[in-house]
């Protein structure tokens, strides 16, 4: 199943639970999209797809500048994985297709 579409996701960050919408667009082995969270939205390109495994980076500007590094697995209408939060360590995230 394709990763393309909108996903409601929850990140279990050191600063508490963060909810948002993740929009993914799969084009062969390339992944692009955007994330919308209460602090704003950021787009990304040059993500990678390998089977059901996805990786991408997002350069956030709010609430502070940092690069988030995501790795995820899509299983039907579910997505889950880890995100590296720069100097704040790692967090898990999960979501479902909207």
Image (spheres, grey):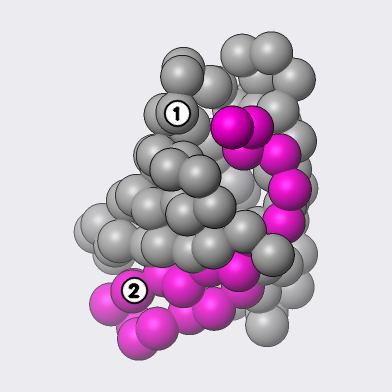
Q: Is residue 41 above or below residue 4?
A: below
Where is mark 1, residue-wise? 52
Residue 1 position (above or below residue 5): above
Residue 57 vertical placement versus 82 (above, below):
above
Q: Which mark is residue 13?
A: 2
Count the marks.
Answer: 2
Mark 2 or 1, which is nearer the eye? Answer: 1
Residue contact at pointers 2 and 1, CB within 8 angstroms: no
**For residue 72, what is the image quadrant?**
top left
Residue sitting at x 33%, y 74% = 12
Around disc 2, counting alpha carbons within 10 Å, would you say few (fewer than 14), some (14 to 19), or many (20 or more)?
A: some
Task: Provide the secondary structure element on which disc 1 rests.
Answer: loop
The numbered dot on residue 29 is none
Instruction: Kindly report the secondary structure that dominates the magenta region of the rendered protein.
Output: strand
Q: Is residue 12 left or right of residue 23?
A: left
Instruction: Please state, as top left, top right, bottom left or bottom right, where the C terminus lies in the image.
Output: bottom right
Residue 66 lies, in percent from the top left, at 50, 55
* Nearest the eye: 12 or 40: 12
Q: Is residue 21 above or below residue 32?
A: below
Q: Is residue 50 magenta?
A: no
Say which residue appears at 45% left-offset and 28% top-offset. 52
Horizontal and vertical percent position of residue 83: 37, 52
Question: What range of the chain is rendered magenta?
Answer: 1-20
Say which residue appears at 29% left-offset and 62% top-offset: 91
Residue 50 appears in the rendering: yes
Image spot of residue 48 (x, y percent): 55, 22
Residue 15 highlighted magenta (yes or no)? yes
**Of the pair 17 and 9, the residue shown nearer to us:** 9
Secondary structure at badge 2 equals strand
Farthest left residue in view: 89
Query: Are there few (<14), some (14-19), or many (20+) residues within 10 Å of tag 1?
Result: some
Q: Earlier in the sequence, mark 2 or mark 1?
A: 2
């Amino acid at each position: 199943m394709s990763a393309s579409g909108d996903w409601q996701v929850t990140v279990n960050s050191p600063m508490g639970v963060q909810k948002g919408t993740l929009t993914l667009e799969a084009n062969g082995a390339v992944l692009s999209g955007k994330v919308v969270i209460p602090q704003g939205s950021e787009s990304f390109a040059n993500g990678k797809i390998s089977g059901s495994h996805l990786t991408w980076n997002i350069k956030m500007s709010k609430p502070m500048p940092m690069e988030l590094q995501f790795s995820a697995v899509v299983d039907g209408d579910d997505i889950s994985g880890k995100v590296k939060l720069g100097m704040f360590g790692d967090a898990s995230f999960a979501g479902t297709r909207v």
